[in-house]
Amino acid sequence: SAGALIEPVIFIPPDLPDGLTKPRAEDRLAIIGGQTMGTTWSARFYRSPDLDLNALTEKIQCCFRDITAELSTWEPNSFISKLNGSRLGQRFRPPPHFLAVWTASCEIARRSNGAFTPFALDWLNSVGLGPTGRETASESLPPWQMAEILLDADGMISRPSDGRLDLSATGKGYGVDQLAFCLRSHGIACFLVEIGGEFASSGIKADGQPWW
């Protein structure tokens, strides 16, 4: 019937591929976590006994603070908030996290033919899901193709003439990628990480089982 709940189904492959990394005999399971992006993050991984977990946790939190400072529409002093509030024609040099997520967002908008759009902030506000509460939004969003021309040949970006940017749909996944990168940079090869239910994993557990 209409509105009936659909039971979730998880598809598990019958076999694991060969060559998956397994923890070393001396590695120990560690679990760390915290808060970011209005939700929680966690990491489960196998580490060497001499790894400083407090220092690693702080490095991860520092990375998340940098991402939030560039991408959060809920932070009035973030780069994206300043861009959204700028005057027409004002150009900015985008910082690295913003640029990486912006580039990925434009690619997803192109591949989905606009089913995904980076111009959703006004609509989110209109339905009460944005940072400012309910606002009246325009009847239509800017065409997704506009996203590809906001960044000019000099690598400078300006806001669209109509609509405001929100990259949260891709920003959290980017944060997960950065979390995985941080672990790998510390020599950690077997892990399961997530932010707000978006996951990434590498290798297998000590008992030879996958992370699911």
Image (cartoon, rainbow, N blue to C red):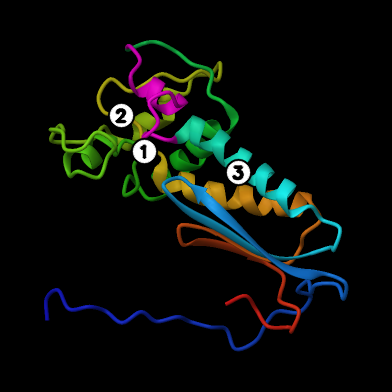
Say whether residue 39 is left or right of residue 185. left
Foreground: disc 3 or disc 2 = 3
Mark 3 lies on residue: 61
Q: Is residue 148 magenta?
A: no
Q: Quadrant of residue 82?
A: top left
Sequence-first disc among 1 and 3: 3
Is 29 displayed left or right of 129 in the figure?
right
With respect to residue 92, does 23 lie above or below? below
The residue under the point 43% across, 31% down is 148
Q: Nearer the viewer, residue 111 or 78?
A: 78
CA distance for labels 1 and 2 = 8 Å
Crowding at dot 1, Cα within 10 Å, few <14 / some 14-19 / many 20+, comes out as: many
Tell me the kind of residue under disc 1. Pro
Instruction: Give the main secondary structure of the magenta stretch.
Output: loop
Which one is in front, 128 or 14? 128
Upstream in sequence: badge 3 or badge 2: 3
Q: What secondary structure is found at the residue carrying circle 3?
A: helix
Mark 3, residues whose alpha carbon is within 10 Å: few (<14), some, or many (≥20)?
A: some
The circle on residue 156 is none
Span shown in magenta:
72-87
Mark 1 or mark 3, which is nearer to you? Answer: 3
Magenta run includes residue 76:
yes
Residue under circle 1? 118
| Residue at 83% across, 69% down | 27
- Identify residue for label 2: 164
| Amino acid type assigned to the residue bearing label 3 in the image | Gln
